[in-house]
Image (cartoon, grey):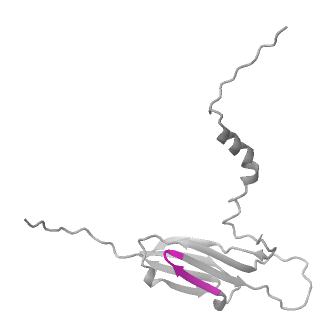
Amino acid sequence: MKKEREETMRLVPWTRELEAAANSWPSRIFEDFFSDLPVRTTTGEGTPSWRPAVDILEKDGNLVLRAEVPGMNQKDIELKLKGNVLTLKGERKLLKEDESNYHRLESFYGVFSRSFTLPETVDRNNIKADYKDGTLTITIPHKPEIKARAIPVNG
């Protein structure tokens, strides 16, 4: 007796590109999942590292970035502007108050670097940064709005 073949209709046409994407998803599922979390990660050299949380908001006509960097000294924080990319770098050192052996270490420490592409609407020449109570506040004013003006046509 001949078995009948069940026909199903595909909702999405199956292509080689789709098959390749479907087969590679397990290896890509966590690629960006952890990229913005302020969690301990490991660099290629096996060195513990972390990324401080950064909030970006508009306040009083300024673009404001607030980075949580508790336990750091002002001298361990570096802020650089190259073109329209603002880079925040630093290092939080592990506090060794005594020579005790730790049973558990949950503090984040190590080198970090965060880069932010600034919009063209900000005044990159008047950036201010303040560090207080473990928070770095970077204030970037917006450029004054250029208003349209009438241009006379001579003839």
If the image is split into quadrants, where does the C terminus sit?
A: bottom left
Q: Is residue 38 left or right of residue 47?
A: left
Q: Which residues are magenta?
A: 77-85
Q: How far across and down, in percent of the image, does residue 34 sit?
A: 71, 63
Residue ID at (59%, 86%): 131
Q: Is residue 108 magenta?
A: no
Residue ID at (47%, 71%): 58
If the image is split into quadrants, where does the N terminus sit?
A: top right
Residue ID at (58%, 78%): 87
Q: Is residue 121 left or right of residue 44?
A: left
Is 2 in front, or is 105? 2
Q: How far across and down, in percent of the image, does residue 78 sit?
A: 61, 85
Magenta span: chief secondary structure: strand
Q: How far across and down, in percent of the image, does residue 76 sit?
A: 67, 88
Q: How far across and down, in percent of the image, does residue 46 sit?
A: 81, 73
Q: Is residue 81 magenta?
A: yes
Q: Residue furthest front?
A: 16
- 13 relative to 68, above or below: above
Q: Tell me how many marks there are.
A: 0
Residue ID at (75%, 80%): 110
- 33 relative to 139, above or below: above
Q: Residue furthest top?
A: 1
Q: Is residue 110 left or right of residue 101?
A: left
